[in-house]
Image (cartoon, grey):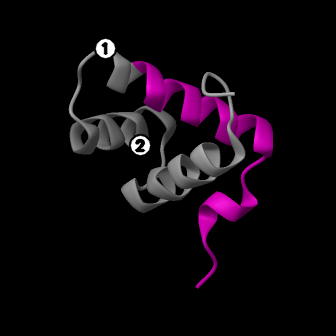
Amino acid sequence: MSDRSDRLTEEFRKEVFLALVTVQDGGTPVAQSRLAVAADFGLSEPDVRRIEREGIEAGWPPLG
């Protein structure tokens, strides 16, 4: 089965990543932040995890 996060544009994935980092920086625990961002963007939690990993590896803003 194809991974949905592979079909999302890079711009959208970066938006998801920024939202995730922002929520975590606000003090929300990591697991809870992933679920919240997944719900906000209509994604699955595994999709958010893949985007999170990609953003960290690529140094996307606000990291880079």
Q: Main secondary structure of the magenta part?
A: helix
Horizontally, is 44 left or right of 16 in the view? left
Give the residue number, with chain letter if any, for mark 2: 38
Q: Identify the secondary structure beneath mark 1.
A: loop
Horizontally, is 52 left or right of 57 in the view? left
Disc 2: CA contacts within 10 A as few (<14), some (14-19) or many (>=20): some
The quadrant where residue 1 appears: bottom right
Within the magenta stretch, is there residue 43?
no
Q: Nearer the viewer, residue 33 or 53?
A: 53
The quadrant where residue 20 appears: top left
Disc 1: CA contacts within 10 A as few (<14), some (14-19) or many (>=20): few
- Looking at the image, which residue is at 66% across and 42% down? 13
- Looking at the image, which residue is at 50% across and 36% down? 41
The quadrant where residue 31 appears: top left
Eye-nearest disc, 2 or 1: 1
Horizontally, is 28 left or right of 41 in the view? left
Nearer-N-terminus badge (2/1):
1
Give the residue number, with chain letter if any, for mark 1: 26
| Image vertical order of residue 55 relative to residue 22, above or below | below
Q: Identify the secondary structure beneath mark 2.
A: helix
Q: Which region shows up in magenta?
A: 1-22
For badge 1, the amino acid type reads Gly
Q: Residue furthest bottom?
A: 1
Within the magenta stretch, is there residue 2?
yes
For badge 2, the amino acid type reads Ala
